[in-house]
Amino acid sequence: MSEASSSFHLLDERIQRFIWAEGWEELRDAQEQAVPLIVKGDRDVIVAAATAAGKTEAAFFPALTYLLQKETPGLIVYISPLKALINDQFGRLDRLCENLEIPVWPWHGDISSTRKTRFLAKRQGVLLITPESLEALLCNRGSSVAAVFEQTAFFVVDELHAFIGSERGKQLQSLMHRIERAMGRSVPRIGLSATLGDMQLAAEFLRPGNPAGVEMVVSGAEGVELKILVKGYEEPLVVKVDDKDDEPEPVTPAQVGMHLFKVLRGSNNLVFPNSRRQVERYTHLLNKLCESHKVPNEFWPHHGSLSKEIRAETEAALKQKEFPATAICTNTLELGIDIGAVKAVAQIGPAPAVASLRQRLGRSGRRKGESAILRGYCIEDALAVDSSLNALLRLGTVQMAAQISLLLENWFEPPRVQGTHMSTLIQQVLSAIAQTGGATAGQLYTLLCAPGCPFSRVSRAEFIELLRHLGQKELLVQDSSGVLLHGRVGEKFVNHYSFYAAFAADEEFRLVTGGKTLGTVPVSQMMTIGQRILFAGKTWRVDEVDAPQKTIYVTHTSGGVPPLFSGGAGRTHSRVRQRMRQLLEESAVPTYLDETAARFLAQAREYYKRMDLSTRVVIDQGAEVMLMTWLGDSANEAIACLLIRRGFTAAPAGPGVEVLKSQHTTDEILDALIDAAIDEPPPLDVLLENVQNLQREKWDWALPDGLLRKAYASHYLDLAEALVWTKTLQDGEKPSS
């Protein structure tokens, strides 16, 4: 070990011997920085470092040293978003801790009750657990929670970015807070992540109310070279020869599949299409190619709808060294599951976000001296007289180029942390009552919503309104002494194993016309009656949205250029859209675009220039108007809501907002927006009064309408950014159309 390492000498001798035995020549940068901060056991620390930079050891070497140097036994509670990650970490930590005589306890749904009972008898060592299992522990152990966790020295939260801003993250905050309340003391928290867009927000998440007390360890990638190639493919125009409803199969996926087959065979890789449906499509194509070429199959699927056995087979195929394997996957393999070395990452279409792209790319180039390789695939429709705005602006290609451009600048989306998380608050109210056997409204408010608590954004008045509504839904009842207990319906939910998860399983909406189901779509944006969507190559008008039944009733319509209904593709940040616009206004061609992708960009630039979109805001398309905002989805949704409130039919559509003219003129639409800029901003529950399908989270069905609208707005709308944009219309001349 290098003499320059001061941190190495702070570690327990047994851990030092382990490091020597592993053949390490030196500690990694993240470890050098983290050890002196964590080894004292008296502060919160975030370790932000590139993928494969040794974050796990950066946390556990000093944390275990602290345990070994204590006179009494201690406990490290490691919390992971994935069971698979727990299984991985168990293998790594068990080998280290065996020599230290520190027990390691994995705890999730697949672990036997015997093993869990053994932990509860000892309550020391390292506990590896998911938030769901931690929730179950608190619910089922009741008054003994303080005793179970009394020896806790650290909470270690892995993949911190995966929790921030989500319902599951709010659940985790609440669980750590409730354990600390039960124990009567604060426990140092260690957060680990490769992808944190805003360190201050991360600190606020890790320790609500005292982010200034969180120490930061930031370590970049250690000189990994990045190689990028983006290939373009054009889907040819289809000439219909009959009136059949069935759309012909696109031809470009087969071409992309053939290229993937040629360049990925013989090595381990990850391929990311943007949906489960596409995972199945490309896996099928690649399996067929292996079959037709009479070679062993190397391509394996991995997504959330597959059984854990099939997912485990894919993970095992990637880990074994003897035969090459490539996984076709959704974001299930984004996080830090150990799947061994990956040569290349392929992204088909734009990634859901720059942060996702960064996380995915971090899987490649882990071996010393190897480059990280990103292969991008962009598919665009051939241009025609009636081509949509999406096609004319080649938005898929431009968005991918913008994402890569921002990735190279090391920018990625900060998490949205302003959400009220009312759905998870309902769960935590029910969970706290299960833990304590009953509580008053005041006790619950003090535990969950007071300043410094996880739900401090919820006012006392909103909390009381929520409790009353939960009483109406029979989730809660109040006894004669004022104590709140589970109601008839609440009892059923809490006693079911599915209660412990804070998030709802991904559900798709059925599209139905005339009693016939057209297919299913994941819904990631708001919907309004009259809105038009593109599905199966046809334009459909939304007539009704049945949120409880997850059904959208539509009728076939014609005319105009419909917005692409891009459910499930991720929500795009304004910074990405603005970079797209910048790319369209420049002349330089990114070196990573192949000839076809470069042609797509040139076509997009030509249309952008021809339509004068650098200054023009409005594109009049006859039956509808497209407002080119170049803002993110949250601001575009807010602009659409401002127009809906004034009687227009409007919907976010890619880089702008589409407004149906009906009996209105373009000037009337612009006047309405200028009025919105001048008027007092409407309350959020009023703004969303006429919007459908606001139920996104697990317990949203139990919220009163006003709180549901507020909760949705806090997560998905950026009214402030929308109003800034409308004020530009007020301040300048009306844009020409």
Image (spheres, helix red, strand yellow):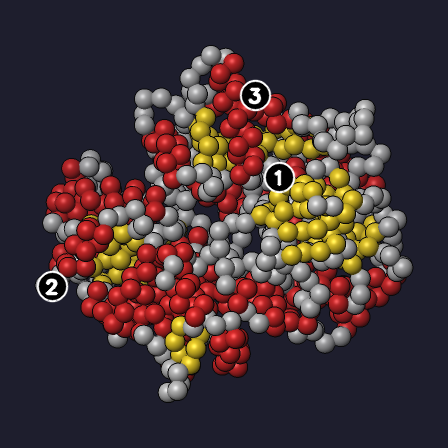
Q: Whole-Å distance between the Cαs marked 2 and 3?
A: 61 Å
Q: Amino acid at mark 1?
A: Ala
The foreground one among 462 and 574 is: 462
- Identify the element where label 3 is drawn: helix
Judge from the rendering whether residue 665 lies leftward or rightward of residue 537; answer left or right: right
Task: Name which residue lies at 50% across and 63% down.
Answer: 699
Judge from the rendering whether residue 562 lies leftward or rightward of residue 296; answer left or right: right
Q: Residues within 10 Å of mark 2 (few under 14, many from 20)?
A: few
Q: Whole-Å distance between the Cαs marked 1 and 3?
A: 23 Å
Residue 401: x and y in percent read: 62, 39
Quarter the N terminus occupies: top left
Judge from the rendering whether residue 259 lies leftward or rightward of residue 67; answer left or right: right
- Identify the element where label 2 is drawn: loop
Task: Name which residue lies at 51% across and 57% down.
Answer: 415
Q: Residues within 10 Å of mark 3 (few under 14, many from 20)?
A: some
Disc 1: which residue:
401
Judge from the rendering whether residue 452 lies leftward or rightward of residue 252; answer left or right: left
Specify which label sits upstream in the sequence, 1 or 3.
3
Q: Is residue 203 visible?
A: no
Specify which label sits upstream in the sequence, 2 or 1.
2
Q: Residues within 10 Å of mark 1 (few under 14, many from 20)?
A: many
562 shown above or below 422: above
Disc 3: which residue:
258
Q: Amino acid at mark 3?
A: Met
Residue 324: x and y in percent read: 39, 23
Quadrant assignment, res 255: top right
Q: Amino acid at mark 2?
A: Thr
Disc 2: which residue:
72
- Identify the element where label 1 is drawn: helix
- Residue at the far left in the pictured view: 71
Task: Name which residue lies at 63% across and 63% down.
Answer: 718
Residue 341: x and y in percent read: 37, 32
